[in-house]
Amino acid sequence: MSYLEEYGKIPLPKIREEVIEQLTLNYAHNNLDEEEFERRLEEATGAESKDTLLALSLIHISEPTRPY
């Protein structure tokens, strides 16, 4: 069975949970600023398709912000 076939069997709520966890980790590691984190979190919470959730997790994440 291919990855895409397996992906198709994963329930939407499980994918949403994993995307939110990934976003939270990226925010905690300063890979997302607060505004971007909140925007993506809101989109993930309301997403009605697996493709939308996947896109949220694949959007380019900028370099971590470093205090100087």
Image (cartoon, helix red, strand yellow):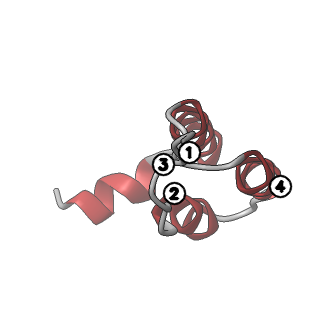
Farthest residue toward the front?
68
> Where is 38 relative to 53, above or below?
above
Residue drawn at the location 83% of the way across and 51% of the way down: 42
| Mark 2 vs 1: CB contact within 8 A | yes
Mark 2 or mark 3, whichever is nearer to me: 3
Q: Which residue position is annotated with label 1?
A: 19
Q: Quadrant of the C terminus?
A: top right
Q: Is residue 36 left or right of residue 30?
A: right
Residue 53 locus on image (x, y percent): 60, 59
Residue 33 locus on image (x, y percent): 68, 49
Q: Earlier in the sequence, mark 2 or mark 3?
A: 2
State the SS at label 1.
Answer: helix
Mark 4 or mark 2, whichever is nearer to me: 2
In this rendering, the count of numbered labels is 4
Q: Which residue position is annotated with label 4?
A: 46
Mark 3 or mark 4, whichever is nearer to me: 3
| Mark 1 vs 4: CB contact within 8 A | no
State the SS at label 2.
Answer: helix
Residue 64 is tagged as 3
Residue drawn at the location 60% of the way across and 38% of the way down: 27
Q: Earlier in the sequence, mark 1 or mark 4?
A: 1
